[in-house]
Amino acid sequence: MPRVVSFHYTLRDPSGRVLDSSAGGDALTYLEGAGQIIDGLDEQLRDVAAGVKARVQVPAVKAYGERDPGQVHRVKRGMLPIEGNLSVGDQFQTDTDRFAPVVTVAAIEGDDVLLDANHPLAGVDLTFDVEIVSARAASAEELSHGHAHGAGGCGAE
């Protein structure tokens, strides 16, 4: 049966550089198998008991996927929804729709801009240092809603 798991984490890239951490903040809580955390981490935390500290290696394919060259596009600067200066490394949403893809400026060549729609961590093997804070069986309501609920539920009908 899926569980609701809360854990603290520190995320590192292959060079050991810290990319993100929950240290000093709230633990991350998720419903197993609901797609709320990357697949490789979800799979490796299954059945891990509360109180356990572990180092979890997640290959790129089970994290944010491999880089896809088909997600890199050359467009004219005037076609972009961005006013003002644009620099390599800038990120923006391609439309006002909140589900529109986020792209990264990979290069600027005259009036052409090379945009990369791959996730910034695509192609990167990740290392998580985790500490499981709590783990409990998910309720029927959580399973039907597809996410963990706090003490008062989520208010969804």
Image (cartoon, rainbow, N blue to C red):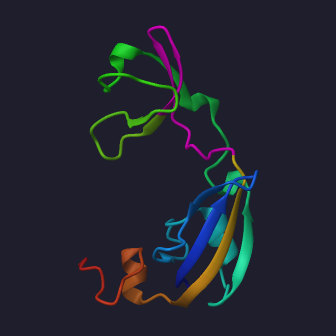
Q: Residue 93: percent from the left, percent from the top? A: 37, 37
Count every numbered label the image shows and give the total. Answer: 0
**Residue at the farthest top position:** 110
Determine which quarter of the picture holds residue 100.
top left
Front-lying residue, 123 or 130: 130
Residue at figure coordinates x 40%, y 82% from the top left: 142
Q: Is residue 138 above or below residue 124?
A: below
Residue at horizontal 31%, vertical 26%? 81
In the image, is 22 to the left or to the right of 66?
A: left
In this view, the residue farthest toward the front is 24
Q: Seen in the image, is 151 located left or right of residue 22?
A: left
Depicted 35 relative to depicted 62: above or below: below
**Which quarter shows the C terminus?**
bottom left
- Name which residue lies at 67% across and 66% down: 128
| Range of magenta residues | 104-123
**Residue closer to the observer: 87 or 35:** 87
- Assign the N terminus to one quadrant of the image: bottom right
Using the image, determine if residue 86 lies above or below residue 2.
above
Residue 4 lies, in percent from the top left, at 50, 83
Q: Quadrant of residue 21?
A: bottom right
Magenta stretch holds residue 107: yes
**What residue is rendered at 73% in x and 77% in y?**
54
